[in-house]
């Protein structure tokens, strides 16, 4: 599913135009990006949480050359799914797939 698909579904369900809906979706995405960039966590009950996690520095290996490479300490955005959503997806896919 793409952002355009999401915009289409929300627009048809809300009665907003696609342009208005795209502005809302873009605003949501930009808010998430800005909050994570500033080190803030976002929690959406029943959906999940966006957080920033600190990764320790380490020595890695280039798989192509075998050369050791130092990876500096860095921060990565993560998304943790809520228990409710995880359970809903699991139950639905068990029914449909099998």
Image (cartoon, helix red, strand yellow):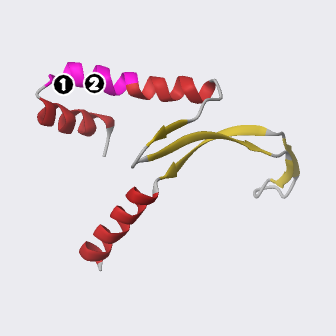
Residue name at image x 52 percent, y 27 percent: 33
Query: What percent of the width, then of the height, locates residue 48?
Result: 46, 47
Q: Is residue 88 magenta?
A: no
**Label 2 to label 1, Cα distance in Å?**
6 Å
The residue labelled by disc 2 is: 22
Q: Magenta part of the protein: which range?
A: 16-27
The residue labelled by disc 1 is: 18
Q: What element carries label 1?
A: helix
Q: Which mark is residue 10?
A: none
Q: Is residue 23 magenta?
A: yes
Query: What percent of the width, then of the height, locates residue 14?
Result: 14, 31
Query: What percent of the width, then of the height, locates residue 30?
Result: 46, 23
Identify which residue, 7 or 67, lies in the foreground.
7
Most common SS among magenta residues: helix
The reply, left or right, for residue 1 in relation to residue 48 is left
Residue name at image x 63 percent, y 23 percent: 38
Identify which residue, 41 or 3, lies in the foreground.
41
Task: Specify the farthest residue to the bottom.
Answer: 98
Neighbour class for label 1 at 10 Å: few (<14), some, many (≥20)? some
Q: Is mark 2 on a helix, strand or loop?
A: helix
The reply, left or right, for residue 36 in relation to residue 70 is left
Residue name at image x 33 percent, y 28 percent: 25
Query: What percent of the width, then of the height, locates residue 24?
Result: 31, 23
Residue name at image x 45 percent, y 59 percent: 83
Which image quarter holds the C terminus? Answer: bottom left
Name the image quarter holding residue 50: top right
Q: Are marks 2 and 1 in contact (CB under 8 Å)?
A: yes
């Amino acid at each position: 599913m793409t952002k355009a698909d999401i915009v289409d579904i929300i627009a048809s369900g809300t009665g907003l135009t696609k342009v208005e809906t795209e502005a809302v979706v873009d605003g949501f995405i930009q808010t998430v990006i800005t909050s994570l960039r500033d080190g803030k966590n976002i929690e959406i009950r029943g959906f999940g949480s966006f957080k920033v996690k600190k990764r320790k520095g380490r020595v890695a290996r280039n798989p192509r050359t075998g050369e050791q490479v130092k990876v500096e300490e860095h921060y990565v955005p993560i998304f943790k799914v809520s228990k409710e959503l995880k359970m809903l997806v699991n139950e639905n896919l068990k029914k449909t797939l099998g």
